[in-house]
Amino acid sequence: MLFNIKSYLILSVLVTIFLQIPAYSQNYKNMYGVTIDGIGNINSIVASLRNHSKRMTTRIVFDEWQPASGYVTAVNKIDTVSDIMGEILDSYYMNSYNVPQFKARAEEYMNLLGDKVDIWEIGNEVNGEWLGSRDSVITKIYYAFSIAKKRQYKTAMTLYYNHNCWEDPRNEMFRWVNENLYQKMKNGLDYVLVSYYEDDCNNYQPNWQQVFDSLRVIFPNAKLGIGECGTTNANRKAEYITRYYTMNITTPNYIGGYFWWYYRQDCVPWNTKPLWQVLDNAIMQGDGVKDGDFKPANN
């Protein structure tokens, strides 16, 4: 009897330890992202998303100065075939909104679309030099982060990778994060993504393994990935899509993403645009890709 009790106690301890091992000890690479910057051809967009071999996560760029009500139909349609990341405001227009205007926009969009959007991108390319004063940017994104968390919504923040491509060294990605971002956000963001356009940075090829290993230290609880990529060079689009969507990063909590910025232009309609097949082939080739749908809102 004593032996059985002891064995039971040991087994209980081992089970408890196993259950406490965080999920990020695995190498996740199971988010397949694309970006749409317009909804005018929504039925064709939905068809393109539906026909992919994997369930996609679609970033919807909510246009500046547009009411949330204008996106209800599109969001409802996309929700049937894809997970959704809602970009509250593109970085290019952040400086056009004062703090009260941005706060009102964040509340309006979350109030109306919150039950359909799986992830709220509370800040896009937040360290970009075109966004305005750092104090204003931090106030805006922290407010959006706070109200999203209060409503128990998933949050994402996208950084702008700018190795030797900044005008002000204070906007270098890692320096900006370390000097400006509140610890509550470092600990509480669900997703931290990186935007990078090689055309903007002298075709520099980052050591992505090193970049994400470093981000993992700063954002220990966040899932990590590429939040934007793309090129306007038609001759290199297929090369870029394949290279990014098949990246093999071993950083714990790395989930892929990529979010090709020109999806609507390059892959819609799906049956007439060759790059749609290039992208679909790439997401199937990616190392470590797991079968089955990925529902980030439930993670």
Image: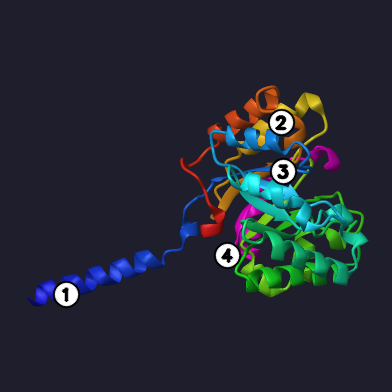
For residue 188, above or below residue 269: below
Amino acid marked by disc 1: Lys
Comparing 17 with 56, the one in front is: 56
In what quadrant of the picture does the N terminus appear? bottom left
Amino acid marked by disc 2: Val
Is 101 situated left or right of 230 in this image? right
For residue 86, above or below residue 32: below
Q: CA distance from mark 3 to mark 4?
A: 25 Å
Per the image, the residue denoted by label 1 is: 6
* Chain-order first, disc 1 or disc 2: 1
The dot on residue 221 is 4
Give the label, 4 or 2, closer to the camera.
2
Give the label, 1 or 3, closer to the camera.
3
Per the image, the residue denoted by label 2 is: 268
| Residue 233 appears in the figure | yes
The dot on residue 35 is 3
Comparing 227 with 105, the one in front is: 105
Give the label, 4 or 1, closer to the camera.
4
Q: CA distance from mark 1 to mark 2?
A: 63 Å
Q: CA distance from mark 1 to mark 3?
A: 56 Å
Which element carries disc 4, helix, strand or loop? loop
